[in-house]
Image (cartoon, rainbow, N blue to C red):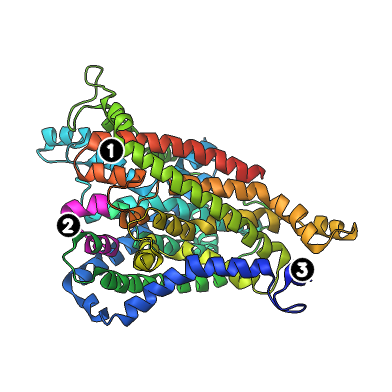
């Protein structure tokens, strides 16, 4: 057995290998310890009754309303786009698909800055509307803006889930409905949508849970109108210094968030089981549905997708190229001064250095640990590797604010208080699952024949594990580590809570610039970070495809 060959801690038999044991210790420290600390402090502090305070109740209601409403809107939008892009012969479907999924690659807080350039009080659109209507068209700041932006940045996830389910709809069932005389609407209403209903429910739960603890959007769009969520409330408690023993109260908020997330994941698990029962692999791809008025539908879809993706990025660039908010963009007013200030600012240089150092460290650690955990769980299956994998994937369902709170509480005991290395620990916890999943994908789709051939040729279990399994998984682990690097370097939620005084990351630099009213400089830095991030994501995903 591989476990004993790699070096069992109990001789032969069922004991875990030394490698599995080391990885267990790694996950216990980086994942179980901070999560357990949040629960223990939150429950044992005796401050749970304070969750009934007016500001906590108001923030809880706002969080639930914004997450549930945006989840419903995201699923509705994603369903319409999936039907039109994946299930019809709409012209330009490949380009539309790429554009529709592009919000996945833009950090939500940068998306908030972008959309403030479209519907902010001083945006060209609102100023033009004010001249004609004597009032702005729409002020994005407030609860409705938070819901809108959460929808825009979560519908791509729902799109991927729903598109995968729609591809499994048996083509013969839709064809039978057509032969019976059913039109496109009838086929969708009586066949397609009922079969993918479990996927719709799963997509709703996943997007709602994700939106529940988003920090960047409500902080930038909700805070100016005093629209507070649990994530921004926790941030205010930690930063204000007006709350007695704030970490205990924030831990209570963390327990509340964990309970809400657990309820959502339990619901998603149940809907996922129903999805497995109701849908199976389709023997053939569903035939494209015919559009009643393609000359009308196609321009509308293009307009919506371009409006949701290209328009905010254009507004972001426009903000970066004007000297001050409200100045119209023209050949006379266009300037690169904002980019010059960004590139010359010591805060930007320090933020970039800190972000790159911490993100590179997280990529190296998660790349190595993720390669070992993913390969062990997929190929070796030593005792304990299954639960180890589940723990490694657990932080994917944990809001970043809880990750930060856990490490913030632990910081004094670990000697990391006011240290940027505390952020590195939180990054490792938050992003380990990215590499584990990247490693598992190619290994699960590859037969174990190569390992068996190596064993037949005389290689031992350790030799075949290292030379075959790990070597096959190495390109995927490398690509996963690049994804961690690019995600961590633009991260905001964890950094905002854990940063030491006089230390900045790129995400926090942009956040502070926007909060202080330096909109042009914040937009310029956002443009740079977005362009570099999009290019890097393209290289990373190409590595995942070819790894």
Gap in Å between the C-alphas at discs 3 and 1?
53 Å
- Residue 13 appears left or right of 172: right
The quadrant of the rendering that contains the N terminus is: bottom right
Gap in Å between the C-alphas at discs 2 and 1?
22 Å
Question: 505 or 432, which lies in front?
Answer: 505
Q: Is residue 40 above or below residue 172?
A: below
Residue denoted by label 1: 522
Residue denoted by label 2: 226
- Residue 59 appears left or right of 363: left
Q: Main secondary structure of the magenta part?
A: helix
Tag 2–tag 3 contact (CB < 8 Å): no
Q: Position of residue 75 (x, y in %)?
A: 42, 57
Label 3 or label 1, whichever comes before in sequence order:
3
Q: Position of residue 58 (x, y in %)?
A: 20, 68
**Label 3 residue SS:** helix
2 or 1: mark nearer the eye: 1
Question: 44 or 107, which lies in front?
Answer: 44
State which region is magenta: 219-237
């Amino acid at each position: 057995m591989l476990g004993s060959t790699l070096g069992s801690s109990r001789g032969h038999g069922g004991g875990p290998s030394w490698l599995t044991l080391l990885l267990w210790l790694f996950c216990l420290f980086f994942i179980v310890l901070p999560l357990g600390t949040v629960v223990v402090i939150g429950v044992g502090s005796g401050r749970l009754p304070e969750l009934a305070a007016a500001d906590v109740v108001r923030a809880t209601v706002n969080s639930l309303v914004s997450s549930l409403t945006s989840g419903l809107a995201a699923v509705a939008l994603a369903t319409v786009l999936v039907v039109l892009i994946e299930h019809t012969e709409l012209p330009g479907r490949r380009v539309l698909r790429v554009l529709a999924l592009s919000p996945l690659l833009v950090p939500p807080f940068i998306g908030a800055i972008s959309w403030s350039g479209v519907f902010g009080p001083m945006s060209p659109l609102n100023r033009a509307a004010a001249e004609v209507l004597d009032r702005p068209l729409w002020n994005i700041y407030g609860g409705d803006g938070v819901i809108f932006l959460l929808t825009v940045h979560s519908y791509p996830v729902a799109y991927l889930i729903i598109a995968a389910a729609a591809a499994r709809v048996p083509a013969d069932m839709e064809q039978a409905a057509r032969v019976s005389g059913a039109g496109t609407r009838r086929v969708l209403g009586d066949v397609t949508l009922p079969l993918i209903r479990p996927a719709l429910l799963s997509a709703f739960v996943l997007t709602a849970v994700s939106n529940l603890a988003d920090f960047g959007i409500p902080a930038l769009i909700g805070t100016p109108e005093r629209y507070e969520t649990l994530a921004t409330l926790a941030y205010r408690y930690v930063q204000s210094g007006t709350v007695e023993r704030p970490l205990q109260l924030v831990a209570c908020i963390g327990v509340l968030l964990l309970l809400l997330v657990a309820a959502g994941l339990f619901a998603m698990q149940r809907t996922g089981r129903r999805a497995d029962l109701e849908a199976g692999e389709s023997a053939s791809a569903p035939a494209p549905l015919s559009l009643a008025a393609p000359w009308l539908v196609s321009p509308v879809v293009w307009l919506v997708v371009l409006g949701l993706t290209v328009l905010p990025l254009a507004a972001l660039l426009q903000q970066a190229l004007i000297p001050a908010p409200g100045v119209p963009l023209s050949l006379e007013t266009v300037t690169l001064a904002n980019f010059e200030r960004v590139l010359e600012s010591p805060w930007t240089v320090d933020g970039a250095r800190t972000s790159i150092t911490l993100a590179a460290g997280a990529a190296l650690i998660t790349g190595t640990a993720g390669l070992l955990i993913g390969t062990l769980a997929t190929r070796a299956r030593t005792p304990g590797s299954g639960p180890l994998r589940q723990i490694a994937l657990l932080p994917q369902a944990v809001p970043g604010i809880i990750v930060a709170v856990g490490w913030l509480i632990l910081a004094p005991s670990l000697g990391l208080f006011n240290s940027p290395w505390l952020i590195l620990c939180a990054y490792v916890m938050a992003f380990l699952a990215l590499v584990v999943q990247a490693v598992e994908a190619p290994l699960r789709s590859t037969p174990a024949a190569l390992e068996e051939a190596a064993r037949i040729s005389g290689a031992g279990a350790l030799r075949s594990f290292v030379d075959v399994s790990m070597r096959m998984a190495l390109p995927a682990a490398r690509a996963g580590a690049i994804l961690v690097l690019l995600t961590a370097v633009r991260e905001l939620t964890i950094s905002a809570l854990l940063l030491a005084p006089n230390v900045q990351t790129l995400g926090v630099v942009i956040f502070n610039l926007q909060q202080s009213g330096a909109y042009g400089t914040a937009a310029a830095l956002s443009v740079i970070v977005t362009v570099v991030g999009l290019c890097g994501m393209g290289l990373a995903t190409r590595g995942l495809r070819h790894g």
